[in-house]
Image (tube, rainbow, N blue to C red):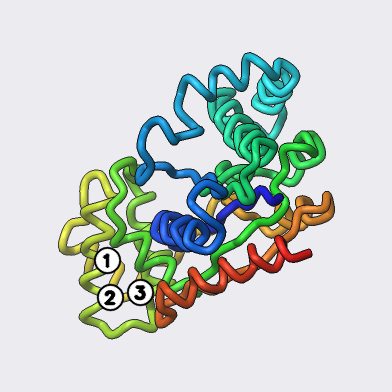
Amino acid sequence: MPLVELAGASGVGKTTIAPLLARRLRETLGEEYVAALPEKDQPRHHRHWRHFQRRLWLACHPGALINAWQLSRRLPAIARARAWFDMFSTLGIGRRCLAGGMRVALVDQGVLRLSLHEAHVPSLPGHLLPDLVLQLVADPVTLEQRRILRAKTKLTRLQGVERLQAAARSRERLAVLPPHRLRELLGQFSEKFCDPPLTPNELETVLAGKLATAPESSRVNRCDPQTCAALQARGVGWKCIDNSEGRTLDAVVEDCLQAVLALLAK
């Protein structure tokens, strides 16, 4: 019985697809045979990933607790120990659900919830790795538009010259859009990500393409290709699902569903 992880870059649509895929899995396999995170649509007594259950799982698996702490100290450091604890408990509870009779455990961001570096992959416990990763992908224009437009409350606010550099990189990604749409999106980028927002003159400079963009940080992003390859080398199954602009939600969810059913049929 598979542990399936939904993963992808920021803005690719995981938050939208996850509950829809969980619903389709329950319709196909039976309500009682699918465990899925997030669990907002489930009654509290049917939830598997509550805080108490996470703490209990960690207490019952001291080896995983130590491993998570060690990974938080290993270079390159990417997250505090708490984030590693959450990742391990997410996957561990998923495995426990499968051992208890579930046919599928679906998690929205498990091992790839962090910006994992390939150097961390060999130290991940094999029994917690997902059996299948469904990686949602989309073209750069779609990703950038969704990143700007999505309703996310916790955001990194850019300051100083970094505001202009980030806005210029965003303009490069969106350059194929009509001028009025480009202006609208960069205005929203400014209000959402810049502290303070770009002045009218700064915005005009960015729109005119007069800024030379500095290279982006070398920090590894979520679903880094080398990290994904390292996970596949450890036996994790992989399926890329296109969620670019123009594809319907139903089509994307159906692709995900069929990938899971194909694994179950093996």
Q: Residue at x 32, y 43 (%)?
A: 157
**Residue 86, relative to residue 141: is it above or below?**
above
Contact between labelled residues 1 and 3, with CB atoms less than 8 Å apart: no
Q: Secondary structure at mark 3?
A: loop
What amino acid is found at the position of numbered circle 2 in the picture? Leu
User: Given the current orientation, which residue lies at the most extreme left position?
Assistant: 200
Q: Position of residue 54 (x, y in %)?
A: 54, 24
Which image quadrant for residue 144? bottom left
Q: Which residue occupies the foreground of this view, 214 or 237?
A: 237
Measured Cα–Cα span from mark 3 to mark 1 = 12 Å
Mark 3 lies on residue: 209
Mark 2 lies on residue: 182
Which sits earlier in the primary sequence, circle 3 or circle 2?
Answer: 2
Q: Position of residue 102 (x, y in %)?
A: 62, 45
Q: Secondary structure at mark 2?
A: helix
Q: Residue at x 42, y 55 (%)?
A: 19
The reply to whether residue 78 is in sight is no
State the mark number for residue 205. none
State the mark number for residue 186. 1
Crowd class of label 1 (few under 14; some 14 to 19; many from 20; radius 10 Å): many
Contact between labelled residues 2 and 3, with CB atoms less than 8 Å apart: no
Q: Secondary structure at mark 1?
A: helix
Q: Residue at x 49, y 69 (%)?
A: 253
Q: Residue at x 25, y 57 (%)?
A: 190
